[in-house]
Amino acid sequence: MYQRKQDMDRILRRLAKEGAGTQCLDEKDGGQLCEIRAEVAPGMGVVIVGRLSQRGTFRRDYYFPYVLSRDISSQADCSIQRHTERETYAGLLDEYRVGISLIFYIENSMEYRLRRLNRLSAVPAGARLTGLSVQGKILLPVNKTAKQLEASQLAATKRGSLLEAAKHGDEDAIETLTIEDIDAYSMVSRRILHEDMYSIIETCFMPCGVECDQYSVIGNILDVEVKQNRITKEDVYCLKLDCNDVTFTVAINKKDLLGEPRVGRRFKGQIWMQGTVDFAT
């Protein structure tokens, strides 16, 4: 409902005045780089970053929405890289369970910069991933027996061990994974002739579009929470998803979601991946 630039400026000025959490970083010219966090619902809101002059005037540079999660999604090796356009940062997780290098926008980059400035530990110890989506749909779950569920979990654990071994140069693991991929391709080619694609593919996690931190996902819903935006009075679904054995939270406006989310069903949509990096003490 905020489409025009003047409407955006008005709501951002309001949020800047109402912001609760503020962090500041001293700059060489005597000014300060400030980050203001304004919550619109518990655990979600807008981050506004700008410069505070010596006279005390605040000039906004950029802003972005954020969603927080309490769950650790990954403790894999994580490297932090600066974006080219501005001094914001991306995290790169070497997450073998997903099968790709997972890139996400770091929402607590100010904390990272302050830690480096104060010579505190800036080594990532884990990442709490979240996704923001503007379009999604609910899919029915894949019907599995208890024996099939157990077999899937064992297969996932075995594949994770093989990927970890292959990462360290184990030739037998690489050969086994190659054979498994060929078998999987053959199985899919055979089943797709008489089955629906979403009964074959239970979950997926793949890059989407030209932005490196956007993904198309299908994930099993583990938990559903509804929050209300205090400004627009719109309901937002916070869906805790399990996707390729990685757990993260996706926030989506109720109006943008097709279907009724329930625990056990699946979410399919495109997300912008964010994350909060936890640093080693």
Image: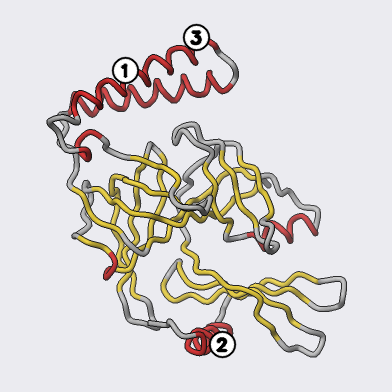
In this rendering, is residue 26 above or below 177?
below
Mark 2 or mark 3: which comes first in sequence?
Answer: 2
Residue that appears at 50% across and 84% down: 8
- Can you tell which mark lies on residue 183? 1
Mark 2 or mark 1: which comes first in sequence?
Answer: 2
Q: Quadrant of residue 55?
A: bottom right
Q: Which residue is mark 3?
A: 172
Residue 203 x, y percent position in the rendering: 31, 40
- Can you tell which mark lies on residue 13? 2
In this rendering, is residue 161 above or below 236?
above
Q: What kind of element bears circle 3?
A: helix
* Amino acid type assigned to the residue bearing label 3 in the image: Asp
Q: Residues within 10 Å of mark 3 (few under 14, many from 20)?
A: few
* Amino acid type assigned to the residue bearing label 1 in the image: Asp
Q: Residues within 10 Å of mark 2 (few under 14, many from 20)?
A: few
Mark 3 or mark 1: which comes first in sequence?
Answer: 3
| In the displayed structure image, the side of residue 132 where residue 222 appears, left or right | left
Residue that appears at 36% across and 47% down: 217
Q: Quadrant of residue 247?
A: top left
Residue found at the far left of this picture: 194
Asked if the residue under mark 3 is in contact with the one under mark 2, i.e. CB atoms within 8 Å, the reply is no
